[in-house]
Amino acid sequence: MSTETTIDKHAIHDKLEAQIKTLEAKLERLKAQAEKAKASIEIKAISDLRAKKHEMHQNLHDLKEVGEDKWERAKTALEARIATFEKSVHAIELKFKAH
C-alpha cells in the first residue's frame, strides 16, 4: 500500500469518525430534550439509536483493520450506516422542532 493511499484512507477514516461524533453529540442533546419534555416515543427512538452507535464505532474500528481487498466495501457499508443514522437523528430533531 502506498503512502498516498494510506494517507487517503486515514483522511477518510477521520472524516467518518468526525461525522459519527457530530451525530452522537446531536443525539445526546436530543436525549436531554426528550427527557425534559417527557417524550417517551422519542426517548425510545433515541435509546435505539444509542445502541446502533456502538455498531458504527465497531465498523469504524474494523475499517482500520480490514485488508486492502475489503476496504472499499467496508467504507461503503459504514457510510451507509452513518447516513441512515443521520436520517434517524434528523427525524427526531424535526419532531422536536414541530412541538
Image (cartoon, rainbow, N blue to C red):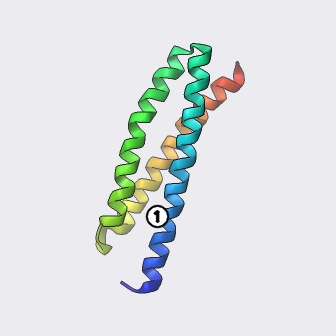
Which residue type does callout 1 highlight? His
The reply, left or right, for residue 94 in relation to residue 3 is: right
Res 54 quadrant in image: top left
Res 76 quadrant in image: bottom left
Name the quarter where the N terminus is drawn.
Answer: bottom left
- Please provide percent x and percent y for residue 9: 45, 72
The reply, left or right, for residue 65 in relation to residue 81 is: left
- Please provide percent x and percent y for residue 46: 49, 28
Res 49 quadrant in image: top left
Question: Mark 1 packing: few (<14 Cα in 10 Å), some, or many (20+)?
Answer: some
At x 64% / y 24%, what residue is drawn?
95
Q: Please, is residue 16 above or below residue 4 in the view?
A: above
- Please provide percent x and percent y for residue 20: 51, 49
Q: Please, is residue 4 above or below residue 15 in the view?
A: below
At x 39% / y 50%, what residue is drawn?
57
At x 56% / y 15%, what residue is drawn?
39
At x 44% / y 34%, what residue is drawn?
50
Q: Please, is residue 8 above or below residue 91 in the view?
A: below
User: Which of these two is toward me, 21 or 97?
Assistant: 21
The reply, left or right, for residue 65 in relation to residue 6 is: left
Q: Quick one: which residue is furthest to the right in this view?
A: 98
How many dots with numbers?
Answer: 1
Q: Please, is residue 42 above or below residue 26 in the view?
A: above
- Please provide percent x and percent y for residue 86: 54, 43
Q: Which residue is mark 1?
A: 13
Name the quarter where the C terminus is drawn.
Answer: top right
Q: Secondary structure at mark 1?
A: helix
Q: Quick one: which residue is furthest to the bottom in this view?
A: 2
The reply, left or right, for residue 9 in relation to residue 68 is: right
